Amino acid sequence: MLLGGDYYKTDNYGIFYNGTPLPAIDVYNPVHTGSITPTSSNPFSNSTDFYGIYAQDQIKLPHNIHVMGGLRYQGIDQKDKLAHITTPNVHAVTPRVGILWQPQKWLSLYGNYVENFGATNGQKADGSMLPPESAQQWEGGLKTEFFDGRLSSTLSYFDLTKQNVATTDLTNPLYSIAIGEVRSRGPEVDIKGEILPGWNAIATYANLDVRVTKDNSGLEGNRMYGVPRNMGSLWNTYDFQQATLKGLKVGGGLTLRDSSTNPSNTYNVPSYTTVDLMAAYSLKLNKSKISFQLNVNNLLDKNYFQAMTSDLNASSRVTIGTPRSLMGSVKIEF
């Protein structure tokens, strides 16, 4: 039996500036003619409070059958601090159920159903916040385990539908309305194995069919923008076994992304592959454990685009991928 609760608070504020558009620029011979002078501004400031309580229980039945069930009560409060508009408190009770059967020691078959309830990122023309998103997901699959757990794999298929997705308000393009619906489904494969003592490998693959199933601007049936159809990764790590290098860990991997599209499905963002590296060292100090880690992302400094979006004015924007970056961290456990 699991019982718990949580509370989160977010504050969001900023300013949108409007100005007279500049003349067109030739991308092959760019000559910048100046800067935009703001003619008006639209400040915004809003806050959201999330709170919830949940209970979940898992029971083992005869014949290696496991059943899990749970309920969650979720409440959301949203406020526009500038307009002094408070969206009525919304709340819901969402279920989570699952079943797992292990006919053989190395094989497990499972299925689950879960509902979700959360805030929508958007604001109506009257200043109030959009109603919360809701979602339902079905998932089923199998898990295998061989060689005393040194090789394991998961094959699954999921079907997820999300409602109240923010879409552009056609009469007020700077604002949104919550009539959108998106469906995501497809198979996923994960394989993890210890090739040699200390050498571990993880391979993942997903084939995602993500489409807009309800919209107010003619996008129904289109692929969801920014989501590749095929995604995969391959990662290797090695923990040194020698006494003199005990605690040292190195790793590297590939991240692969298929091409994605823009909202109208008229342009594609090319596929890309990035290379990442990591190194970590852990040591014990009295009863504490200290870990140092360095990650190098996009080692080859690959130029790529993550997504493309467009708006009602037929302008397009692309999200440029992060160039080579380094991140270091120190973790202390006591």
Image (spheres, helix red, strand yellow):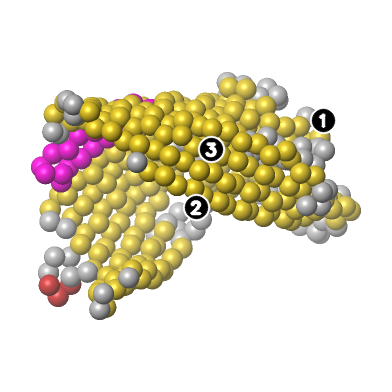
Amino acid on which disc 1 is placed: Thr
When asked about the image quadrant of residue 247, the answer is bottom left
Q: Which mark is residue 303?
A: 2
For disc 3, the marked residue is: 73
Residue drawn at 80 percent across, 42 percent down: 127
Q: Is residue 275 left or right of residue 123?
A: left
In the rendered image, residue 23, in percent from the top left (x then y), is placed at 82, 48
For disc 1, the marked residue is: 171
Kindly report the distance in space between the C-alpha atoms of the residues bearing marks 3 and 2: 44 Å
In the rendered image, residue 320, in percent from the top left (x then y), is placed at 56, 51
Query: Is the residue marked by circle 2 packed among few (<14), some (14-19), or many (20+) residues within 10 Å?
Result: some
In the rendered image, residue 89, in percent from the top left (x then y), is placed at 68, 39
The N terminus sits in image quarter? top left
Amino acid on which disc 3 is placed: Tyr
* Residue 200 in view (yes/no): yes
Q: Which SS does the magenta portion mostly show? A: strand
User: In the rendered structure, does residue 174 fall within the stretch colored magenta?
Assistant: no
Between 178 and 254, which is closer to the camera in this rendering? 178
Q: Which mark is residue 273?
A: none
Badge 2 or badge 1: first in the primary sequence: 1
In the rendered image, residue 11, in percent from the top left (x then y), is placed at 67, 55
The C terminus sits in image quarter? bottom left
Q: Is residue 64 left or right of residue 208?
A: left
Q: Which residues are magenta?
A: 139-155
Badge 3 or badge 2: first in the primary sequence: 3
Judged from the image, the secondary structure of the residue bearing numbered disc 2 is: loop
Between 14 and 295, which is closer to the camera in this rendering? 14
Amino acid on which disc 2 is placed: Asn
